[in-house]
Image (tube, helix red, strand yellow):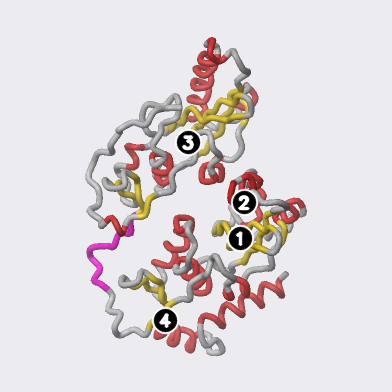
Amino acid sequence: MGKSRDEKPLGSFSAKKESDLSPVDPCQGWINPCEFCDRRFGDWINADEESLAKVPSNPGIFQMAFKRKNILEIVNIILHPDDIQKVAYETIDEAKEHIGDKKFKVTKTLILFRWIIFKINDKDIAVLYAHWHNNGVLPRFLKSWPGLNILQKTDSLTFSDKLQKWCYTKKEPFWKKPKQQSAKLLEVVKKCKWAEPCEICDTYFTKYERLDKVIANHKAPNSVGLYEVAVCFGQKVNRILIEYCLDKLLNIKNDLEGYRFWNDILRREENNKKNAFLQVRWIELRSPVNDNSCFLYAHFLNGDYDGKNYLLKGEKILEKNKHFVRRNHDNKWYFVLNDFKEYKITKFKQRKNILNDLDEDILYLKIAN
């Protein structure tokens, strides 16, 4: 494994209060499985000629790992703005020379790799660089953090000197005046009781089903929406994950069936119970940006769910919806009753409020199914 390096980021950073910053989740690697990376990169592939030929000649990120005695260690991460196939061949050739050293001959070492492609101007990829940097320890063959130069130019993340981590920051446009909320009638969106039974979630999500059977029988819907995973042992149901699938290409079905490391969740110490198994439930969304969907995003953001970083997709949509506001004094999301009254009566007279809209959506989905 590499050593931690005092590679302090350079450049000017946002002078935000530390309380306004939320650290990007650090990578669990380089030996431990990391869901954040695995969801983006997928399965590892043996480094043979046939597999290397399938690496595309596109901008992307190439990861290489050594596997010895069933222990997989990520040893290199390489970014290339033009052609990751070229760096794939070069990196694997160099790795074979390292394996030729005497210290590698004691046990058989396999070379594995995986990759992702991206657009040069893809801002979301900066979160992945921050995710690795916040680990604090470099992989074996790296001397500097990948993507650090891109991180220093991004506006969506900032480096905290106090935390020594890259963090999310909520930037407010300087040209916008603060909203005058005193004239608006607001009602807070009820929060999700993540560790307790939640009436809203139980009403609008489907019933729990065993995850392995859903995947084996291809029962998950080919639709955009949200799904939730829980660990069940005995009569106890422990909700552990909520995932937003708001892209038609990466919908609920594709996301559930494309992830190969579900069993690793059951191997964690807190979930390693006798007869424990995973359950899943979901809700399909007619539109990821309508008021009904935004109500659910606010419901989770106001709640007790620890993995708030995974809810950022919904938060970005909420920030663009004029019918929802976040108040500074409690950092909670509210919906504007004035807006809903004017909008709903003129356009949908039979619907009195947003909760009625949600009921209608569920009825629609049941009939469609």
- Position of 344 with respect to 215 (left or right) is left
- Say which residue label 3 marks: 60
Given this view, does label 3 or label 1 mark the residue nearer the observer? 1
Amino acid type, label 1: Asn
Q: How far apart are marks 1 and 2 (CA)?
A: 9 Å
- Say which residue label 4 marks: 187
- Position of 313 with respect to 279 (left or right) is left
Range shown magenta: 169-178
- Say which residue label 2 marks: 271
- Of marks 4 and 1, which one's residue comes earlier in the chain? 4
- Of marks 3 and 2, which one's residue comes earlier in the chain? 3
- Say which residue label 1 marks: 238
Per the picture, the main secondary structure of the magenta-coloured stretch is loop
- Counting from the top left corner in percent of width and height, residue 28 is at 49, 41
Q: Distance between the residues labelled 3 and 4?
A: 45 Å
Given this view, does label 3 or label 2 mark the residue nearer the observer? 2
Q: How many marks?
A: 4
- Of marks 3 and 1, which one's residue comes earlier in the chain? 3
Q: Residues within 10 Å of mark 2 (few under 14, many from 20)?
A: some
- Counting from the top left corner in percent of width and height, residue 145 is at 37, 33
Q: Is mark 2 on a helix, strand or loop?
A: helix
Looking at the rendering, which quadrant does residue 20 occupy? bottom left
